[in-house]
Image (cartoon, rainbow, N blue to C red):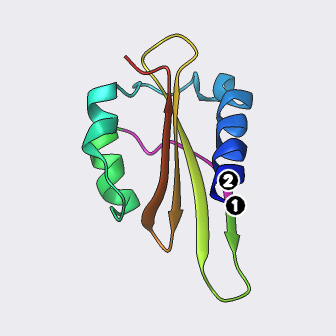
Amino acid sequence: MRKKIVFIICTLAITILAGCRSQNQSVTLEQFEQTYYGMSLSDVTGILGSEGKQIYAVITEVGFTQTLYIWQGNGENSAVTMGFTNDHLMTRIQIGLE
């Protein structure tokens, strides 16, 4: 199941990367490495320097709020995708950061 989620997140990141080009700041590998599981969206935003683009949000049947955000990376065709459950970082993936 986790591999399927990671695949979906990577696919989404690549698919909508062009939509992130309007962000003022791009994320570096150093910034990405400062994030860790369990952080709040607010803490992640403080480290990455921008709010990112919300690309998915749902409230599950049992009341969990799940959101997915994407940030433009600093490398060519690079991106960061992070998933949150109840405002806690649960998934983080980077593609091509420098």
Q: Is residue 54 above or below residue 32?
A: below
72 vs 13, left or right, is left
Do residues under tags 1 and 2 come within 8 Å of each other at their CB atoms?
yes
Alpha-carbon span between mark 1 and mark 2: 6 Å
- Which label is found at residue 45? none
Q: Residue 56 appears at what percent x and percent y? A: 68, 55
Residue type of the residue flagged with mark 2: Ile
66 vs 40, left or right, is right
Residue at the bottom extreme, as displayed:
62
Classify mark 1: helix, strand or loop. loop
- Residue at image point 33% right, 61% down: 39
Q: Residue 22 appears at what percent x and percent y? A: 56, 24
Which segment is the magenta one? 50-56
Residue type of the residue flagged with mark 1: Met
What residue would you read off at disc 1? 1
Q: Residue 69 appears at what percent x and percent y? A: 56, 48
What quarter of the picture does the C terminus occupy? top left
- Residue at image point 25% right, 42% down: 34
Q: Residue 7 appears at what percent x and percent y? A: 69, 42
What quarter of the picture does the N terminus occupy? bottom right
What residue would you read off at disc 2? 5
Does the magenta-highlighted stretch encompass residue 84? no
Q: Is residue 87 above or below residue 71?
A: below
Q: Name the front one of labels 1 and 2.
A: 1
Classify mark 2: helix, strand or loop. helix
